[in-house]
Image: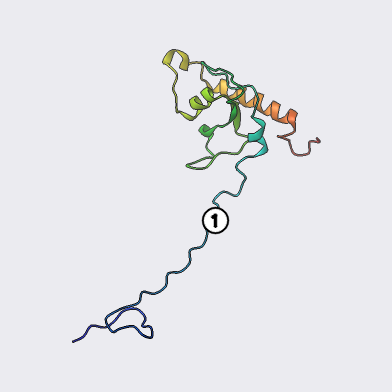
Amino acid sequence: MPRKRSGKRRKGDSDNEAVAPKAKALKPLKSRSTRPKMTPARKSAKGQDCTLCLPGCRNDTETVVLCHLRMFGGGGMGLKPWDGEAVYGCGHCHSLIDGRDRLIPELAKHFTWETIAYALIRTHRIMRAEGILMMKGEEE
């Protein structure tokens, strides 16, 4: 008993050849993030002093970036917290905040919540002075 053919037949096909259905065109992937990668707050970090000043800080203004504080939640894999939950930090301090580097136990006692809170306040003061961070109802 002959087997049934699968697929579509075209005019001129032999009986032993099956034609595969055409593949659908792929749609372009949509960007997952709706907010811009380079926000005014992130741009403002360029050339600033490091507000964290953790032990070993070089205060190299060339490497200062906006370091997002993930210890308060608000972020996840591939997600950053709101830019208001960030401080200006040099490359060394940023590595310590993100957990890429660690301090020796003798110096770890200087890496406290008070240090982070002080850096956050200093960063917010700089951002408010530059007009990047504004409170509701506040005039420029």
| The C terminus - image quarter | top right
Count neighbours of disc 1 (C-alpha within 10 A) and say few if under 14, some if 14 to 19, many if 20 or more: few
Residue found at x 60% / y 42%: 37
- Which color scheme does this rendered protein use? rainbow
Residue 59 percent coordinates (x, y) = 59, 19
Residue 100 percent coordinates (x, y) = 45, 28
Q: In this orientation, which residue lies closer to the viewer: 117 or 57? A: 57
Residue found at x 51% / y 19%: 111
Residue 135 percent coordinates (x, y) = 73, 36
SS for callout 1: loop
Residue found at x 60% / y 34%: 85
Residue 132 percent coordinates (x, y) = 71, 34
Q: Is 126 situated above or below 28?
A: above
Q: Which residue is mark 1?
A: 30
| The N terminus - image quarter | bottom left
Q: Is 127 situated above or below 106?
A: below
Outermost residue, right side: 139
Outermost residue, top side: 106
Outermost residue, front side: 12
> What kind of residue is marked 1?
Lys
